[in-house]
Image (spheres, rainbow, N blue to C red):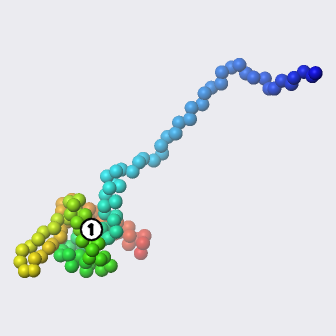
């Protein structure tokens, strides 16, 4: 029988331990930002807010005329959502016929600079 072959010599010196750490190179999305984008980014909501920024008070029909492709059903739904979130205030004016007007609240008006910047961005990059 032959002599068994020996493999490479093994070192008895302890080898250094390599620790791999993963550094997160990006931050997580701010939940408030995400909530704002989800609210204002809903279909037609940005257009409604933009129209109300450019006009102080509008009746339902005036908003519908300013955003012609928007159905009355969806406009009504979006106005209720914006009112529930405190972005829009609905005012009923007595008389015949009863007049319902919509206007931005202070919270809604605070969106004006962001909407303006988005409009500028859209004209530059989407036109």
Q: Is residue 45 left or right of residue 17?
A: left
For the C terminus, the quadrant is bottom left
Q: Is residue 23 left or right of residue 71?
A: right
Disc 1 crowd, CA 10 A, few/some/many (<14, 14-19, 20+):
some
Q: Is residue 7 left or right of residue 100?
A: right
Above or below, 15 against 114 in this view is above
Residue appearing at x 12%, y 69% in the figure: 91
Residue 74, percent from left and from top: 29, 72
Please state which of residues 64 and 25 is positioned toward the viewer in this rendering: 64
Taking the view exactly as shown, the residue that stands out farthest to the top is 12
Residue 11, percent from left and from top: 73, 21
Please state which of residues 7 and 73 is positioned toward the viewer in this rendering: 73
Q: Secondary structure at mark 1?
A: helix
Residue 29, percent from left and from top: 39, 51
Q: Is residue 117 visible?
A: no
Q: Please count the marks in the image.
A: 1
Q: Is residue 13 left or right of residue 22?
A: right
Residue appearing at x 23%, y 59% in the figure: 85
Above or below, 42 against 7 in this view is below
Q: Which residue is mark 1?
A: 78
Taking the view exactly as shown, the residue that stands out farthest to the left is 95
Above or below, 22 against 39 in this view is above
Residue 58, percent from left and from top: 18, 74
Q: Quadrant of residue 113?
A: bottom left
Q: Is residue 8 visible?
A: yes
């Amino acid at each position: 029988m032959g002599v068994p072959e020996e493999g490479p010599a093994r070192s008895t010196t302890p080898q250094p331990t390599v620790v791999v750490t993963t550094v997160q190179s990006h931050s997580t999305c701010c939940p408030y930002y995400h909530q704002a984008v989800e609210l204002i980014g809903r279909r037609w909501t940005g257009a409604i807010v933009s129209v109300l920024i450019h006009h102080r008070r509008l009746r339902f029909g005036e908003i519908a005329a300013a955003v012609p492709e928007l159905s009355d059903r969806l406009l009504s739904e979006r106005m209720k959502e914006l009112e529930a979130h405190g972005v829009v205030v609905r005012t009923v004016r007595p008389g015949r016929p009863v007049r319902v007007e919509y206007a931005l609240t202070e919270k809604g008006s605070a969106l004006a600079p962001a909407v303006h910047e988005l409009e500028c961005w859209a004209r530059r990059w989407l036109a």
